[in-house]
Image (cartoon, helix red, strand yellow):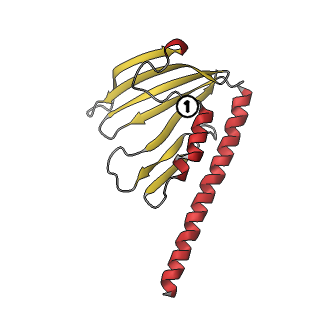
Amino acid sequence: MKKILSILMLSVLISSCEKGAIKSDFDKSLSVWQEFKKSVNNNYSYTVKTESWAGFGDSTIISVQNGIITGRKYASYVIDSQTGQKNSTGSWTETKADLNSHDSGAQTITIDAIYQKASSEWLKINKNDNTIHFETKNQGMISTCGYTNKNCKDDCFVGVVISNIKGE
């Protein structure tokens, strides 16, 4: 019984440490984002990427001016299994006047909204059933945030992968 109790307490401690580390990383990243946003006067763009194990993917560039989304540019591709080359399967561009006129592409939200969604949804998901992902490879700003269900086999990630954030 003592052995089971010790194992249970250790797993709670490890879970708390992981949760604390993610919270600390998130807070640091949010601070870096807020400084960056201020330095570019809330004018920026970011690229959201998706890629499947099945050999296809896409990217969406979201443009933001004065904190308001002003455009979205989308491109999709398939990966040639022989060469590894990405071959275009389509693209489009939306302006402020026709935002969200296409069904495909990343959701039109600001990075502020992404951090909010990360905090309120993706990082709060049940950790017993899911694996939480959080990375800050964009000069300390969010690059990956979301989760995958531990029982899912293919393309199960729920969240966002941002490959690039730049000031405009």
> Residue reaching furthest top?
97
Circle 1 residues within 10 Å: few <14, some 14–19, many ≥20: some
Residue drawn at the location 46% of the way across and 29% of the way down: 106
Residue drawn at the location 42% of the way across and 50% of the way down: 148
Image coordinates of residue 27 in percent, x first then y, are 67, 47
Which quadrant, please, contains the C terminus?
A: top right
Q: Is residue 47 visible?
A: yes
> Residue reaching furthest left?
82
User: In the rendered image, which quarter is residue 92 located in?
Assistant: top left
Residue drawn at the location 39% of the way across and 56% of the way down: 150
Mark 1 highlights which residue?
Answer: 164
Image coordinates of residue 78 in percent, x first then y, are 31, 29
> Residue reaching furthest bottom?
1
Question: Of helix, strand and loop, which one carries label 1?
Answer: strand
Rendered view: 82 above or below 61: below
Rendered view: 154 above or below 138: below
Could you tell whether 160 is left or right of 17 in the image?
left
